[in-house]
Amino acid sequence: MSLVRRIARPLLAAPFILEGVRSFRQPARQIDVAPTAFEKADSVLAESSAPGFVNVRTIVRGTAAVTIGAGVLYATNRAPRVAAATLLVTSSVGWAGRKKIWELSGEERIQELQSMLVDAGLLGGMLLAAVDHDGKPSVGYRVNKFVERSQKAAEKKQRQLEKKASAVEKKAKGTSKDVQKKIAAQQA
């Protein structure tokens, strides 16, 4: 791994880990963003066949735990593409909690806009990280190459078997002619 990646990955993962820890410790922060939506989700969960301990707080904490785990995996270069994709999916880094920017004015509006752009930059970084190959080919490329090598090996093996089969066939024809000659000689 290059020095730049060794430094950049923990730096890029840090805000996601921090947000995950904050959401895990205080799930109400996320719930306060859209209380009516979370109340509806809570009532749907209560009416469903889900276990009693499953509620919105549990789901927020579970998502936060996944975010923390993915952030740590990304920061330590363990499955970085999967970790980056997981971070991209599970963590909005505050996008859901944004105020309606058109309702704000002055300095508050500028700060909110700046905060949104920072979050967009983080999400863009994770998007790049999810497709970063780190000098290694992607899984799809490796699978395609494996299939191509397997097909070439199978074709080569088939040609070898066809050669052996034709040699055996020629030998069998030669042997049958010898047998026919011996039988003809014995009958004469």
Image: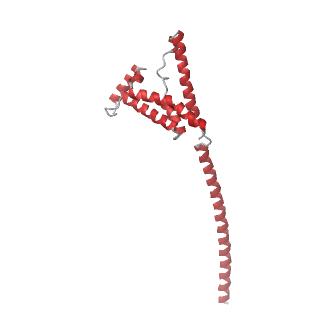
Residue in the image at 57% along x and 37% along y? 6
Rendered image quadrant of residue 42: top left
Q: Please say if 118 is above or below 135.
A: above
In the picture, the quarter occupied by the N terminus is top right
Nearer to the camera, 179 or 19? 19
In the image, residue 150 sits, relative to residue 105, either above or below, namely below
- Whether residue 145 is situated above or below residue 40 in the rendered picture: below
- Looking at this view, is 112 or 144 the one in front? 112
For the point 55% across and 27% down, the residue is: 122
Say how the picture is coloured: secondary structure
Q: Quadrant of residue 8?
A: top right
Tell me where residue 165 sits by quadrant: bottom right
**Residue 186 left/right relative to 48:** right
Left or right: 81 with respect to 30? right
Q: Residue furthest left?
A: 52
Q: Residue at x 65, y 82 (%)?
A: 179
Query: Residue 34: x and y, percent?
Result: 42, 20
Which quadrant of the rendered structure holds the C terminus? Answer: bottom right
Residue 94 location in percent, x, y? 48, 23
